[in-house]
Amino acid sequence: MSTAESLDPVNLNRKIQAIESATVRFAGDSGDGMQLMGSQFTTSSVIHGNDVATLPDFPAEIRAPAGTLAGVSGFQINFASQDIHTPGDGIDALFAMNPAAMKANLIELVDGGLLVVNSESFSKDSLEKAGYKENPLEDGSLSSYQVVAIPLTKLNRDSIEGLGLDRKSGDRCKNFFMLGLAFWVYNRPIESTTRWIEKKFAGKENLLEANTRALKAGYHYGETAELFTSSYKVDKADIKPGVYRKVTGNSAVVLGLVAASKLSDKPLFYASYPITPASDILHEIAAHKNHGATTFQAEDEIAAMCAVLGASFGGCLAVTGTSGPGLALKMEAIGLGVMTELPAVIVNVQRGGPSTGLPTKTEQSDLLQSIFGRNGESPVAIVAPATPADCFDMALEAARIALKFMTPVILLSDGYLANGAEPWRIPDVESLPKIEVNYTTEVNSEKGFQPYIRDERLGRPWAIPGTEGLQHRLGGLEKQHITGAVSYDPENHDFMVRLRQNKIDGIAEDIPPLQVNGKETGDLLVLGWGGTYGSITTAVDRARKAGKSVSSAHLRYLNPFPKNLGEVLSNFKNVLIPELNLGQLRMLIRSKFLVKAKGLNKIQGRPFQISEIQSAITKALEE
């Protein structure tokens, strides 16, 4: 939305339009550096003071054929001078490196939107790979957009001439030329990127100089070429004072786990088998050895989960991370954690399934697997973050619940949250929750140490092996109440099954009530969980501004539910539940609360757009 105009001080024939927000997407071949471009543009926008939300989108194949639709990689960023919750619906500007990248993303470019392309990539061969019969730059099919076609390859080569780089190495700098141009179009500072280049290519003077030149050449090309009638500026957002940094969901999980380790005074042990999109967690925790974190790359998912239980038995804050098919493999060992009542955190970064499914695309398809996916009555606690930054808080919560109640806890993130980024206000350490540990060093009975004696929360004591007088054994066989001895007694089994369930149910007394966004009664409640928060909240806020009787609520605790959930549901005539699955939360809500909840379901590997939820709200209110 344009709010004001001013003249460009360098070229008085050109205007600078002040806008409240913009959605920009970079697209090219996998390997063209699109994720790097997006990340650098995001960092610059955060430093500039904007609120941002991002949506990386990349192919699953390690190297799809260059120039094909299957190999297109993209990165979308929404940045604004106001509070935003999503990476945006329609794209205001598309920077495309080749015909395939343009074709794959053009459908989301708004009418009148800015389209910047590398004209030299529109060869006959590239057009055929992208499925074009005619050159769209020449047939008039792009007339509804602001098309800026630049000879990117030549401009980049000219900018690095004389540095002695071979042709292949020099052409790799094209992404920085395009990034510099995007910086100019939106009046972004380039200093953070030049610093990144200096650090990245330290000791490689030719590459450092080439990438720096390409970045600056792109910026100044926008400034001097007569190709743009205007540029845009997005002012700083009015945000709460504090120290901020950019985080992705995965990096926020890591920070939350490291903080939980410090708050509980327990060493962090992280074991996992690499799997997209959870692998970044292993990489980032490995960088925190100075905080006492230990990482272990296991030979498979089963080994990773078993190692976590061993580390937990030994007194660590034990964590594993995985994605859908990996969670399926871990299930038997998670059941062992339920039986032994050892604390553990299992981070599940959901992706499209089943099987290997859509490894790089998001989905919310593991809720029922998380709740029911084990043999026997095997309850675990489940929490789910709502935003990338919220991954920090919910990682802390997962650790807090696991240690306090002596139970495995599943943290349900997803690909959209894991790869998405937003500004995160670094919290005051004093404001972080206290983490209690059910740790014991004393014999707790006249008959000696009883490993399954309970506290008021039904948690059992955590006795570290090697502690004098606290010898005990664990295993997957049923335990005798109090003593922990192996028991086949039918009555004891019935008692222990109910006790373990009651312990998980009792967590509801220890978590905050569900908050309602908007009025607490009305015609429609939009209930969500996980990464749908931004789209739901924005859509509901817009509907309320339009005078509609609609509110929203977002579940961050999925097992058990908050105590007041039934009361919240009963205050609304209708309930709408948007989910990136076929209705898993809706099934749980309908069966537990007998509410005729309706679903809005999408399984396309992409998050909801705000407009999709707005349309569903309108339809639900009309029925």
Image (spheres, rainbow, N blue to C red):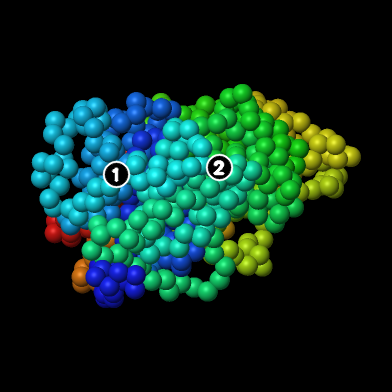
Quarter-of-image position of residue 473: top right
Q: Quadrant of residue 285?
A: top right
Measuring from the top left, give residue 17's x and y in whole percent.
28, 70
Query: Is residue 478 found left or right of 189 in the rendered image?
Result: right
* Element class at badge 1: loop
Q: Which residue is mark 1?
A: 151
Q: Determine which of the numbered discs, if any, sits on residue 399 in the image.
A: none
Element at label 2? helix
Considering depth in this image, is 473 or 425 the residue closer to the camera? 425
For label 1, count other residues whose C-alpha is less than 10 Å away and answer few (under 14), some (14-19) or many (20+).
few
The picture places residue 150, in percent across and down from the top left corner, at 28, 47
As shown in the figure, which amino acid type bears the numbered disc 1?
A: Pro
Among the two numbered marks 1 and 2 on one chain, the one whose residue lies closer to the N terminus: 1
The answer for how far apart the CA atoms under marks 1 and 2 are is 23 Å
Considering depth in this image, is 102 or 543 the residue closer to the camera? 102
The N terminus appears in which quarter of the rendering? bottom left
Taking depth in this image into account, of 440 and 548 the one nearest to the observer is 548
Residue at 63% over, 63% down: 432
Report which residue position mark 2 lands on: 206
